[in-house]
Amino acid sequence: MTGESSPLAVTNIHVFRAIAEEAASEARRLLGASRRPKPDGEPGWIITFDPERKSFKQALIAIAFAGMYLEALLGLAGTKRLGLQGYRKIERMTYEEKLKRLGVEDEALLTNCKRFRDARNELTHEKTYDTRSIRVAQEECAHAIEVVELVTTAVGAQNSERPERGASSTQSDWHFVFCGLGLS
């Protein structure tokens, strides 16, 4: 580049992923702590009721932050690959549609993204009249973390390719600043 500075993106993407992973881990730990084997070797478990629903809350946090991470990841990758104006054309699309526009064609991954998107929407936008499915938040949170890993790998593989035709060098040579205020 000749004296031009590259665009700068300030992001907390790593914080979003860390929160999702830490909350998922805590949800698993709390769920495991609430179960103990039946006495005398009988088959089955004794489940201890948690009136504060701590595992459920941690699972919801993990799902919400996994969604925030995916939006940030796809936004960064899309902007880098398509340029800012190119990404703006797709930013309101579903995860699956964005991934397709970014060159990801793995049907299993796209199906996993749809499941995650549907679960996240059902859990975070609860409807009292919606009885189409029953989801277990802790199971969906484990799936959310799996989707985060799969999409990160898929988008990383795509980002190693050159920018799409029409994206200028200043559009594709983004510098990313990862920030977080550690205020107490």
Image: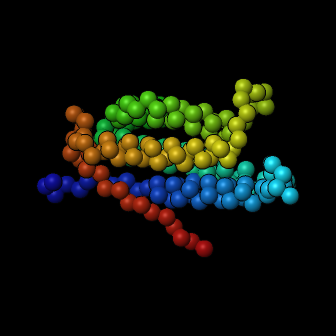
Residue 132, above or below 161: above
Residue furthest to the bottom in view is 184
Q: Quadrant of the N terminus?
A: bottom left
Image coloring type: rainbow
Task: Please name whichever residue, 12 or 85, is drawn nearer the observer in this view of the structure.
Answer: 12
Q: Is residue 11 left or right of residue 122?
A: left
Q: Quadrant of the C terminus?
A: bottom right
**Residue at 57% from the left image edge and 54% from the top image edge:** 20
Q: Point out residue 65 in the picture as x, y percentages from the top left corner.
A: 57, 50
Q: Is residue 23 visible?
A: no
Q: Is residue 178 left or right of residue 162?
A: right
Residue 150, above or below 117: below
Q: Point out residue 56 in the picture as x, y percentages from the top left corner.
A: 73, 50
Task: Please name whichever residue, 124 or 144, is drawn nearer the observer in this view of the structure.
Answer: 144
Q: Point out residue 68 in the picture as x, y percentages from the top left corner.
A: 53, 47
**Residue at 35% from the left image edge and 56% from the top image edge:** 176
Residue furthest to the front in view is 41
Q: Is residue 151 left or right of residue 8?
A: right
Task: Please name whichever residue, 173 or 110, is drawn nearer the observer in this view of the structure.
Answer: 110
Q: Is residue 5 visible?
A: yes
**Residue at 47% from the left image edge and 48% from the top image edge:** 149
Q: Is residue 118 left or right of residue 39?
A: left
Q: Quadrant of residue 167?
A: top left
Q: Point out residue 140 in the picture as x, y percentages from the top left corner.
A: 63, 42
**Residue at 62% from the left image edge and 46% from the top image edge:** 141
Q: What is the count of numbered marks?
A: 0
